[in-house]
Image (cartoon, helix red, strand yellow):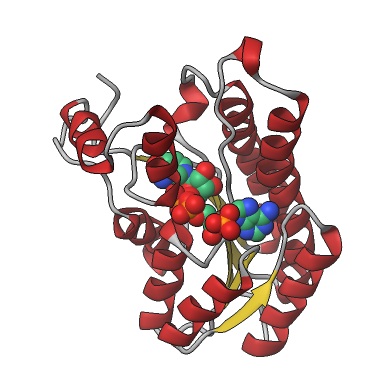
């Protein structure tokens, strides 16, 4: 299996979950050192991969195919935020977020489907967000995350005839470097930021990367063999 953005956060938890179930895992990330650390922990393989670069992504898919002998699972976790209110959002803020999430995922699924269509099997999980429903300061990110939901449905239609399931998970607040970055930006201690976030969640806690990894594992399991084109919110309940 191949997980982009697998060095930390949700991607790393997903890599660990799949490795614990016996998968040959390739951890692809911008940050090669961190990818190597995660891969070493789970007996996987690290590849340096900037998902905005087609050649990097195609090479990562090739590595996964040669390591596993096939490509059973692709999970696209690579992601960044460049939050700002619209009037302060720069062209670079827009391009970086759209390129990483939308173009990066496009490159990954296009490269992966080649192998999956040939082998007539595969599972693909894209990562959206509750921000797809709208979030102040995230014009770029919410547009990208809503786009990934549309991409999921189209891919499920195109790849279904080849026995490839394509689904999407849309996490709410998950405690990772990304949410820490938001806390740092607004100058609130992370613990306090998480507590405030938890109060807005029906289950009264923030999510952990393992919560998302578990849902991804389910979507890639035989139990979800007839589930495709779906968006599963992993957010501790509906928005309040
Ligand atoms: P993290 O920042 O912990 O992990 C994201 C990883 O992606 C990092 O290792 C990062 O590397 C890597 N990455 C960034 N840009 C690229 C790139 N161009 N090519 C390859 N790798 C890249 O974030 P999360 O685990 O929280 O996020 C994972 C996914 O989940 C993202 O798509 C995010 O948008 C989504 N998500 C997260 C939520 C949350 O609350 N945490 C909520 C909803 C969705 P580096 O650190 O070097 O930049």
Q: Where is residue 119 in the image (x, y as percent from the top left)?
A: 72, 76
- Quadrant of the rendered image containing residue 117: bottom right
Near-viewer residue (122 or 104):
104
Q: Residue at left 75%, top 32%?
A: 92
Q: Residue at left 60%, top 21%?
A: 139
Near-viewer residue (65 or 51):
51
Q: Position of residue 47 (x, y in %)?
A: 67, 76
Q: Does residue 14 sit above or below 40 in this rendering?
A: above
Tell me if residue 239 can be seen. yes
- Quadrant of the rendered image containing residue 95: top right
Q: Residue at left 52%, top 85%?
A: 44
Q: Does residue 161 sit above or below 20 in this rendering?
A: above
- Quadrant of the rendered image containing residue 94: top right
**In this picture, residue 167 sits left or right of residue 175:** right
**In this picture, residue 173 sits left or right of residue 114:** left
Q: Residue at left 36%, top 36%?
A: 183
Q: Does residue 126 sit above or below 131 in this rendering?
A: below
């Amino acid at each position: 299996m191949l997980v982009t953005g697998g060095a930390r956060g949700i991607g790393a938890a997903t890599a660990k979950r799949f490795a614990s179930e016996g998968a040959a895992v390739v951890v692809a990330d911008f940050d090669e050192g961190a990818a190597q650390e995660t891969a070493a922990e789970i007996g996987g393989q690290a590849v340096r991969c900037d998902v905005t670069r087609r050649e990097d992504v195609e090479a990562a898919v090739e590595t996964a195919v040669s390591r596993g002998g096939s490509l059973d699972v692709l999970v696209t976790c690579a992601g960044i935020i460049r939050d700002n209110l619209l009037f302060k959002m720069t062209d670079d803020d827009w391009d970086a977020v759209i390129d990483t999430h939308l173009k990066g995922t496009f490159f990954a699924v296009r490269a992966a489907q080649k192998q999956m269509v040939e082998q007539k099997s595969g599972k693909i999980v894209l990562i959206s967000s509750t921000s797809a429903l709208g979030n102040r300061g995230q014009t770029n990110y919410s547009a990208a995350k809503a786009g990934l939901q549309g991409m999921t449905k189209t891919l499920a239609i195109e790849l279904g005839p080849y026995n490839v399931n394509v689904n999407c998970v849309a996490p709410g607040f998950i405690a990772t470097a990304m949410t820490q970055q938001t806390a740092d930006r607004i100058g609130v201690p992370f613990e306090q930021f998480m507590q405030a976030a938890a109060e807005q969640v029906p289950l009264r806690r923030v999510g952990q990367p393992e919560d998302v990894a578990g849902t991804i594992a389910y979507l890639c399991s035989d139990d979800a063999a007839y589930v495709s084109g779906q968006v599963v919110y992993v957010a501790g309940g509906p928005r309040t």
